[in-house]
Image (spheres, helix red, strand yellow):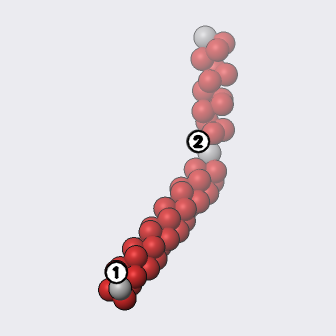
Amino acid sequence: MYRHTIYDVFSHKALHPLKLHRFCMAFIIAISFEFKVIILVLRIVRHYKVGK
C-alpha cells in the first residue's frame, strides 16, 4: 500500500501535463529534425548519382 502510494505520487509528478507537453514537443522537434536531415542526405546522394 505504502509503495503503491509512492508510485502514484511519482507517476503523477512524472505525468504532469506541462512536463508531458514539453516532452512531446521536444520529441516532435527531434523527429522533424532527423527527418529533415534524412531528406537532405537523400537529396545529396541523389544529386551525386545524377551528377556522375
Earlier in the chain: of badge 2 and badge 1, it is 2
- Please give the name of the residue rendered at 52% of the width and 68% of the height, measured from the top-left corner: 33
Residue 21 position within the rendered picture, expressed as x and y whole percent measured from the top left: 57, 56
Residue 23 position within the rendered picture, expressed as x and y whole percent measured from the top left: 59, 53
What quarter of the picture does the C terminus occupy? bottom left
Give the residue at mark 1.
Answer: 49
Q: Is residue 48 above or below residue 23?
A: below
Of all residues shown, which one is farthest toward the bottom?
51
Q: Is residue 20 left or right of residue 42?
A: right
- Please give the name of the residue rendered at 66% of the width and 38% of the height, measured from the top-left corner: 13
Q: Is residue 32 left or right of residue 26?
A: left
What amino acid type should be assigned to the residue bearing mark 2?
Answer: Leu
What amino acid type should be assigned to the residue bearing mark 1?
Answer: Lys
Q: Is residue 34 above or below residue 1?
A: below
Kind of element beneath mark 2: loop
- Please give the name of the residue rendered at 45% of the width and 73% of the height, measured from the top-left corner: 41
**Any part of residue 21 in sight:** no
Mark 1 neighbour density, 10 Å: few (under 14) some (14–19) many (20 or more):
few
In the rendered structure, find residue 2 and report the number of the disc placed on it: none
Residue 28 position within the rendered picture, expressed as x and y whole percent measured from the top left: 50, 62
In the rendered structure, find residue 15 and report the number of the disc placed on it: 2
Kind of element beneath mark 1: helix
Q: Is residue 9 above or below residue 4?
A: below
Q: Nearer the viewer, mark 2 or mark 1?
A: 1
